[in-house]
Amino acid sequence: MISISRLLRPEKHPFPGDSLRYAKTGSPHPPVIVWHITGRCNLSCRHCYAYAAAESLPQTGFSKTDAREFLRMTAEIKPPALLFSGGEPLCHPDFWDILYEARLVGIRTAVSTNGTLIGESEARALAKYSSYVGISLDGPRETHDSFRGRSGAFEAALRAVELTSSEGCRTGLRVTLARPILEHLAEFLELAEKLRVSRICFYHFMRSGRGVLDESLAPDGAEEDSALYRIIEWADNRAGADGRPSPEILTVGDAADSVRLYRYLASKYPFRARTAMKLLARSSGKPAGAGILSVRWDGAVFRNQFSWGAPLGNWRDIAATARRAGEKMKLARECESCGEMGTICGGRSLGFGVECRVNATSDIRPK
Ligand code: SF4
């Protein structure tokens, strides 16, 4: 996760999660745990990295007893947050009990959702028991509904944003940078501004899950560079009253965004680029997805949510797995030619199992 907001204004005081991302070396913290509590979903989106669907996957590998035990063990690790994901977490029959129980054992929780199952009572419960809710929105209405495979999904997501925000729940948007969405990026940014959310997370499109089935969804390197540059510039032009970009902007899934961001700063604000470089160097050298663990519905634990190859462990040894996940990563050979840029990315782009779209000599700015 790269905080565009933090790095654009490195001299300003940090956002809440920045201490996790850019903490000084020598102060390791337990990982944020993403809990894919179910593989089921009421939608079946074209780009779903979890391949979630209504029926085909097991609902959860966790019985209620196991879920309780998992929460007890997780509380002992003291993660900065437990992020409920899926599939669609609200499809899990015991979701509300488990969310409530997580808070009872003192875990800070967040929820990633498609928003379509959130009405007034759900919004109230989320405001009460979750510190944050991230709602997926893939561009304007037609794009969103075509991606989500359901007409009306867009309206439902917007209503969820309004309901959770008005209940006082910190609410953000999650958008996937798939090619059809990039074509409507300007409209998406305009809409996001109107919604006045507190945070926007831009997820790089991942060739995993259902995302591997349709090559037309995958942007090429130039399209991604151009989109990132537009997002950075948009964020740069949105300083709030405290001088920081508002809403908070993050990108997920490509550590090479730190290189893109650094180059933008170096060309516009060289003094900030030097400070940003120091912050970035603190997170490099950690493995891809360091600071995060992904626990799937069958109990397997992975380094991140996007590449479910060989598991690192099982939820029953979550403490040992969390320790292993923080071990330093060896820089891939392909990264060696990146020189100083490799220092700030740390090779974590390749560690995510994605092809690196940035190299040391390319210029990311649109010609
Ligand atoms: S992307 Fe989200 S909403 Fe869509 S099918 Fe996957 S889990 Fe469900």
Image (cartoon, rainbow, N blue to C red):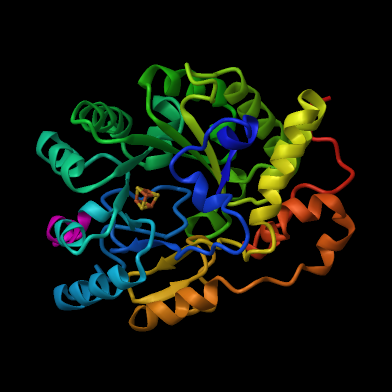
Q: Which residues are magenta?
A: 91-99
Residue at (19, 48) in percent of width and height: 129
| Left or right side of 150 for 184 | right
Q: Quadrant of residue 141?
A: top left
Residue at (46, 29) in percent of width and height: 139
| Left or right side of 326 for 114 | left
Residue at (26, 63) in percent of width and height: 55
Residue at the outermost left position = 121
State how many labels appear. Answer: 0
Q: Quadrant of residue 225?
A: top right
Residue 82 locus on image (x, y percent): 33, 58
Whether residue 365 appears in this view of the structure is no
Whether residue 332 appears in this view of the structure is yes
Quadrant (top left/top right/bottom left/bottom right) for the C terminus:
top right
Q: Is residue 55 above or below residue 188?
A: below
Q: Main secondary structure of the magenta part?
A: helix
> Of 30 and 183, which appears nearest the observer?
30
Q: Quadrant of residue 233?
A: top right
> Of 173 and 282, which appears nearest the observer?
282
